[in-house]
Image: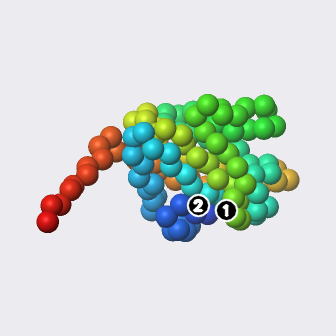
């Protein structure tokens, strides 16, 4: 059985899951992060996955199975949960990201869609 977790974005929005999917917009070359609010208030038993519009999940962080892709991602305890940071965002980082905790054969998971924009515009106004 699967229960819902909440995502808490760095923009201070709280997104209850199983509603219309919300987005986190990221810019190429910058880091972006979001927090999965955990029943345990930490990264204990937490797994992170990416679903790049394909049938299989790509594992980012699963300590039980010794998987942690440190070159691209940072996973750390945050207020009330576990924060995933995507370092040096690239266009291929677009997709759905999932956090999951399994406690006593019960799965709790959350999802957020990350959209990457490759352009940053700077407008300078002269007086």
- The structure residue drawn at horizontal position 65% and vertical position 32%, both measured from the top left corner, is 69
In which quadrant will I find the C terminus?
bottom left
Q: Tell me the element at label 1.
A: strand
Q: Residue at x 58, y 34 (%)?
A: 72
Q: Which residue is mark 2?
A: 7
Q: Secondary structure at mark 2?
A: strand
- The front one of 30 and 81 is 30
Camera-side residue of 46 and 107: 46
Residue 14 position in % (x across, y down): 55, 68
Please provide percent x and percent y for residue 60: 64, 36
Would residue 9 be found to the left or right of residue 91 on screen?
right
Instruction: Tell me if label 2 and label 1 are in contact, CB under 8 Å.
Output: yes
Q: Is residue 57 visible?
A: no
Judge whether 40 appears above or below 120 on screen.
below
- CA neighbours of label 2 inside 10 A, class few (<14), some (14 to 19), many (20+): many
Give the residue drawn at x 61%, y 39%. 73
Left or right of residue 70, residue 96 in this image: left
Which percent across, then down, holds residue 89? 46, 39
User: Could you classify mark 1 by the number of other residues whose Cα lies within 10 Å: few (under 14), some (14-19), or many (20 or more)?
Assistant: many
Mark drawn on residue 45: none
Q: Which residue is mark 1?
A: 37
Q: Using the rendered image of the protein, determine whether residue 27 is visible from the camera's viewpoint.
A: yes
Q: Whole-percent x and y of residue 20?
A: 45, 62
On screen, residue 79 versus residue 8, left or right, reads right
The quarter of the picture where residue 78 lies is bottom right
Q: Earlier in the sequence, mark 2 or mark 1?
A: 2
Above-or-below relation of 9 to 86 = below
Please identify the residue farthest to the right as the structure is shown: 104
Q: Residue at x 70, y 34 (%)?
A: 68
| Up-down relation of residue 125 to residue 55 (above or below) | below
- Colour scheme: rainbow
């Amino acid at each position: 059985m699967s229960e819902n977790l909440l995502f808490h974005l760095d923009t201070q929005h709280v997104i209850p899951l199983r509603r219309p999917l919300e987005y986190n917009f990221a810019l190429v070359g910058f880091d972006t992060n979001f927090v999965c609010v955990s029943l345990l208030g930490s990264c204990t038993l937490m797994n992170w996955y990416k679903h790049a519009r394909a049938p299989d999940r790509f594992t980012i962080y699963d300590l039980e199975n010794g998987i942690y892709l440190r070159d691209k991602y940072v996973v750390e305890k945050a207020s009330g949960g576990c924060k995933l940071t995507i370092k040096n965002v690239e266009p291929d980082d677009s997709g759905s990201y999932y956090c999951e905790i399994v406690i006593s054969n019960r799965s709790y998971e959350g999802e957020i869609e990350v959209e990457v924009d490759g352009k940053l515009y700077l407008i300078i106004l002269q007086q």
